[in-house]
Image (cartoon, grey):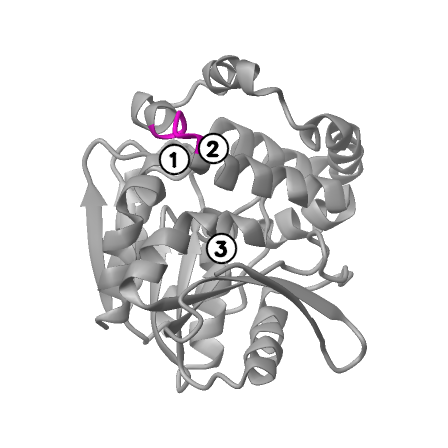
């Protein structure tokens, strides 16, 4: 099942979302990465149908079909999720977050502990504003954090300049060259040679950029700011999955996060990276999540 819909929230803001998996299954809210959009949840569709899981995947404010919300904070997100789920008539639910979706899952679990049964964090972003040593981050992330703190207007101009390029769809014949240029881990490059996985990852990114550079920028700023709560405040069950070959967020950073979460079952997967882990292990991730 793939269903696209739009919810009007109080105040007039619109939230676009798509559904995947089993329409009558266990509800799971999908939190996409960055830069990305709700169609990243295509990765879940086949295993979700097989397991009886209903995936609800919203675009965050300013991404693709969702209204831009200026000066938003991470703490605003649970109200968005509440509006979407109330519209769908869903009470309790679980959450699956990939990469940059992690803070949004943690925030929702902290704000709505009576409705969130469990969350799965896959290759999750860490609280970057708390970092004293950023060596465990992807070099691009370190560079963006430095510009955000020292020259934010330059960073904004660079985002606007990058948009026309990053919104393009490269020809299929150039995909091997693109993967080589990204200097991926071998495990990630191999997983992304699968055309369906490549489309789920990169089409969701292009969709975000096609919406607006402003929306992608607003989403990026969230990661550089304090979350407004501590990891120690997340008391719902957390299923944390992280690859030992992850370049975006080193396994050392993920181990530190796992130690701080009060109710965490962590799995550190050998020979898995930032892309290959959700691609190769999605069925296991979902099966474990709905068993919680």
User: Which residue is tagged 1?
Assistant: 136
Dot 2: within a 10 Å radius of its alpha carbon, few (fewer than 14), some, or many (20 or more) residues?
some
Tell me what residue is drawn at x 40 percent, y 83 percent.
Answer: 92
Q: Which residues are magenta?
A: 191-195
Screen quadrant of the C terminus: bottom left
The one nearer the camera, 266 or 116, is 116
> In the rendered image, which quarter is residue 15 located in?
bottom right
Element type at mark 1: loop
Q: Which mark is residue 9?
A: none
Left or right: residue 80 versus residue 99 is right
Q: Percent from the top left, x then y, of residue 135?
A: 41, 32
Asked whether residue 228 is in view, the answer is yes
Query: Is residue 268 placed above or below 232 in the rendered structure?
Result: above
Magenta span: predominant SS is: loop
Q: Nearer the viewer, mark 1 or mark 3?
A: 3
Left or right: residue 235 versus residue 218 is left
User: Which residue is tagged 3?
Assistant: 101
* Tag 1 near tag 2, CB within 8 Å: no
Q: Percent from the top left, x then y, of residue 32?
A: 51, 53
Q: Nearer the viewer, mark 2 or mark 3?
A: 2
The residues tagged by marks 1 and 3 sit, at their Cα atoms, a distance apart of: 18 Å
The residues tagged by marks 2 and 3 sit, at their Cα atoms, a distance apart of: 19 Å
* Tag 2 near tag 3, CB within 8 Å: no
Query: Is residue 186 placed above or below 206 in the rendered structure?
Result: above
Q: Percent from the top left, x then y, of residue 225?
A: 59, 55
Tell me what residue is drawn at x 44 percent, y 18 percent.
Answer: 183
User: Which residue is tagged 2?
Assistant: 198
């Amino acid at each position: 099942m793939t269903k696209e819909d739009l919810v009007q929230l109080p105040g007039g803001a619109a939230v676009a979302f798509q559904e995947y998996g089993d329409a009558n299954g266990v509800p799971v809210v999908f939190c996409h990465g960055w830069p990305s959009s709700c169609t990243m949840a295509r990765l879940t569709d086949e295993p979700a149908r097989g397991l009886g899981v209903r995936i609800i995947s919203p675009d965050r404010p300013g991404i693709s079909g969702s209204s831009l919300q200026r000066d938003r904070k991470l703490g605003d997100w649970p109200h968005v999720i509440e509006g979407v789920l109330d519209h769908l008539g869903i009470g309790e639910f679980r959450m699956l977050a990939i990469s940059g979706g992690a803070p949004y899952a943690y925030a929702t679990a902290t704000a709505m502990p009576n409705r969130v049964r469990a969350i799965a964090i896959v290759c999750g972003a860490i609280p970057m504003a708390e970092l004293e040593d950023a060596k465990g981050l992807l070099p691009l992330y370190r560079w963006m954090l430095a510009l955000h703190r020292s020259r934010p207007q330059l960073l904004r101009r660079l985002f606007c300049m990058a948009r026309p390029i990053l919104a393009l769809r490269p020809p299929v014949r150039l995909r091997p060259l693109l993967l080589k240029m990204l200097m991926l881990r071998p495990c990630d490059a191999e997983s992304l040679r699968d055309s369906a996985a490549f489309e789920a990852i990169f089409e969701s990114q292009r969709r975000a950029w096609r919406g607006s550079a402003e929306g992608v920028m607003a989403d990026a700023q969230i990661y550089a700011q304090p979350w407004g709560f501590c990891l120690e405040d997340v008391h719902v069950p957390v299923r944390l999955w992280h690859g030992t070959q992850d370049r975006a967020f080193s396994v050392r950073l993920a181990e530190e996060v796992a130690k701080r979460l009060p109710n965490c079952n962590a799995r550190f997967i050998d020979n898995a990276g930032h892309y290959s882990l959700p691609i190769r292990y999605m069925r296991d991730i979902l099966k474990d999540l709905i068993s919680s």
